[in-house]
Amino acid sequence: MFTADQIVAHLVGDYLLQSHWMATEKTKRSLAAAIHAVAYTVPFAFITLDPLALTLIAALHFPIDRWRLARFVVWLKNGARGPVTATGYTDDVPPWLAVWLLIIADNVLHILINGAVLALV
């Protein structure tokens, strides 16, 4: 289900192919999130040429990044206490730590979803 190729494709798509503009605008503008989702998917074409798999990877990447859905995963795993913050962590977590933990949760979420797509399609 999870391979080194899939993890490398994720890292290349999410970090090497993501411009500063995409990174700063994808949670504010759907166009930036869509362009990022398409660019993100390009490295996966080296793993599979299945159009359904590539479409699902892009289509699922878009909402996760556009609406920063990993923060809801974090919020739920921490007991769903209080309002959902920008990171999903409560205000007593140092901001630098909350941001890094959210980034890690986001990466894990993407890797799990991509692995499932590649295994099922």
Image (cartoon, rainbow, N blue to C red):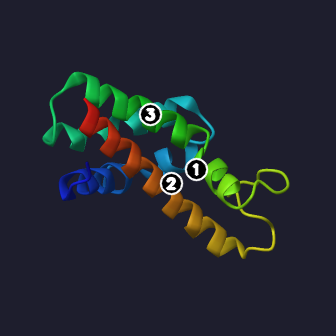
Structural crowding at the residue carrying mark 1, measured as other residues with C-alpha within 10 Å and reported as few (<14), some (14–19) or many (≥20):
many
For disc 1, the marked residue is 70
Q: Earlier in the sequence, mark 3 or mark 2?
A: 3
User: In the image, which disc is placed on residue 106?
Assistant: 2
- Asked whether the beta carbons under mark 3 and mark 2 sit within 8 Å of each other, the answer is no
For disc 3, the marked residue is 60
Residue plotted at (41% across, 39% down)? 36
Disc 2 residue type? Asp
Q: The C terminus lies in which quarter of the figure?
A: top left
State the SS at label 2.
Answer: helix
Give the distance between the C-alpha atoms of the residues marked 3 and 2, in whole angstroms: 12 Å
State the image coordinates of residue 68 (x, y, percent, origin top left).
60, 45
In this picture, is 29 found above or below 102? Answer: above
Q: Is residue 76 left or right of residue 27?
A: right
Structural crowding at the residue carrying mark 3, measured as other residues with C-alpha within 10 Å and reported as few (<14), some (14–19) or many (≥20):
some
Query: Residue 85's quadrant in the figure?
Result: bottom right
State the image coordinates of residue 32 (x, y, percent, origin top left).
50, 36
Residue plotted at (44% across, 56% down)? 107
Disc 3 residue type? Leu
Q: Is residue 31 left or right of residue 81?
A: left
Disc 1 residue type? Ala
State the image coordinates of residue 83 (x, y, percent, origin top left).
83, 51
In this picture, is 49 found above or below 108? Answer: above
Give the distance between the C-alpha atoms of the residues marked 1 and 2, in whole angstroms: 5 Å
Closer-to-camera residue (115/61): 115
- Asked whether the beta carbons under mark 1 and mark 2 sit within 8 Å of each other, the answer is yes
